[in-house]
Amino acid sequence: MPQFKVRFAPSPTGPLHIGGARSALFNYLFAAHAGGHFVVRIEDTDLERSRREYEDEIIESLRWLGINWTEGVRQGGENGPYRQTERLEIYRRYLDQLLQQGDAYYCFCSQEELESERQDQLAGSSMQRYSGKCRGLSAKEVEEKLAAGMKPTIRLRVPEHKIYVVNDLVRGRVTFESDNSGDFIIAKSDGIPVYNFAVVIDDVLMGITHVIRAEEHLSNTPRQLMLYDALNFKYPQFAHISLILGSDRQKMSKRHGATSLVQYREMGYLPEALFNFLALLGWSPEGEQEILAPEEIIKAFTLERVAKSPAVFDMDKLNWVNQQYLKKKTTSELAEMLRPYLAASEWAGALKELDEFRYGLLVEAVRDHLVCLADITRNIDVFFREAVYEAEALEALAGASVLNVLEAVREELPDCMQPPEIKDFLKATIKQLKLKPKDVYMPLRSALSGQTHGPELPYLICVWGREECLRRINKAIARIS
RNA sequence: GGCCCUAUCGUCUAGCGGUCAGGACGCCGCCCUCUCAAGGCGGAAGCGGGGGUUCGAUUCCCCCUAGGGCUACCA
């Protein structure tokens, strides 16, 4: 059995994005399914934008999602280091090799020169590619410029009239002509290699067999193939997965709302829900079941079932998936998970007064309304706010039998915190007063909360307790009489 | 502009020449119910357009259109 090895190689230039998370997930799923290895390496060659804090955040997000790797940064392995800025000597060797072979050359063109060249090409509507000005520099000329202290970039000598074929596992055969690409830069003037170069060296040295990455890299692949050829490396398999789009079908970005994983974690989306939802974006299992545990997804995951077309990120569906996972939690698990959200809310003080049992009842009463954990703060006002009578509530309190109901409850409400018993008590009251359930529930709810809707009444009563209920009933009676 | 990718309900998708075009989210209706949710049941909603190939195209090929990506001393 062949040993598969895949990798996820984020740039630490921002938090882990939804799209990045999905790429990481697909790699993880592929490896886990086939019993292969999964490497995480950090592509931090962009010194300007890379920051260690982002690396920390990305790693944390991956772990939170439930993605583990067998080799790589913060994990170790035989092919390290796993941070590109720590691999500069390695790249240097291959850069020198290419220079020596004559497959690469120094380019002394300044950025200004290149920019104006680009502008000219744009105006003339010709191809946008490097002119090859420094291609034919003699050894002596190079020597002189170097001696003069000029800092050159290194360019790959792109072969002429060659067809490059990417046999993509999700897209099939994709071909590119080398003539469409000018000699491109493989190392910047500060000596640091550029993405297209470093990625090839690392993938080869780390023994990557399958490169699974976002589609935006498909157009980069021919340039990488040129490097594989020049260095006499064997190609890996490629699989380019489609992009995740915002609701306007543009690539997901900040203006589409929450795009980073930490934002979802903070809102109280469960990692298993994101895992499930992200897996369904561009991949589908064979059956009709959509709520699947990680192990089930791993078992079913194959690249053959990965879709080619881009997917729009659907918040409604994520909400639904999250709700499904929220439902699987026991009330006490939920109660624990909700604590930090409540502690940060305006009801933190009031909640401290509540004993554990009644806190449990409160969670039980509102749990079905939660789409994410952060929603809790929008659902519990009614428990703590003084009743302010809405128009509908006043209407409900205007009925002929209302006073009878309120007085009967005031006289006989048991001192108890078990919703079923309160339910029985209300049932008995209904029978005793010979009323319809609605004619007891509605006025009572309105009197107690000032609203005609909210959590199940027995729960509300139990969380408030007898004394508080009597106080509220008296207030309502005073209001209507 | 050039190169490349993509195209089934509003959205995520199944389909891999012959299907009443299936499922899910969302939406609508009904049931349950003190209310709001949840849950159950039901419904509306789709193959972008034009040419081929074929007895037969959602499915294969070409063109158009639309959307997206790449075209950096970013990744």
Image (tube, grey):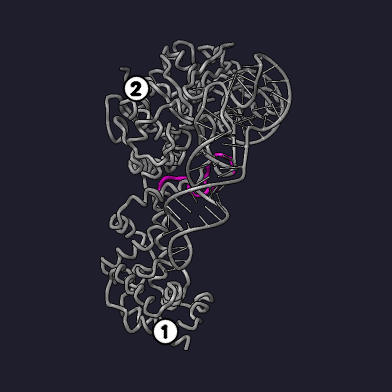
Residue A448 image offset from top left, x and y in percent: 41, 77
Q: Find the residue positioned furthest to the bottom.
A: A481
The residue to which callout 2 is attached is A4
**What is the chain identity of the residue bearing mark 2?**
A
Mark on residue A404?
1
Residue A154 image offset from top left, x and y in percent: 49, 21
Depth check: B32 or A234 in front?
Answer: B32
Residue A225 image offset from top left, x and y in percent: 48, 17
Q: Residue at x 36, y 45 (%)?
A: A271
Q: Residue A119, located in which quarter of the rendered image? A: top right
Numbered range of the magenta stretch = A248-263
Taking the image as shown, residue A404 lies to the left or right of residue A114, namely left
Taking the image as shown, residue A160 lies to the left or right of residue A201, namely right
A445 in relation to A152, above or below:
below
Q: Is residue A250 magenta?
A: yes
User: What amino acid is found at the position of numbered circle 2 in the picture?
Assistant: Phe
Disc nearer the start of the sequence (2/1):
2
User: What amino acid is found at the position of numbered circle 1 in the picture?
Assistant: Asn
Q: Dot 2, how many residues are within 10 Å of its Cα: few (below 14), some (14-19), or many (20+)?
A: some
Q: Does the magenta stretch include residue A95?
A: no
SS label for mark 1: helix
Depth check: A92 or A51 in front?
Answer: A51
Q: Which residue is drawn at 37% across and 58% down?
A: A367
A266 in relation to A437, above or below:
above
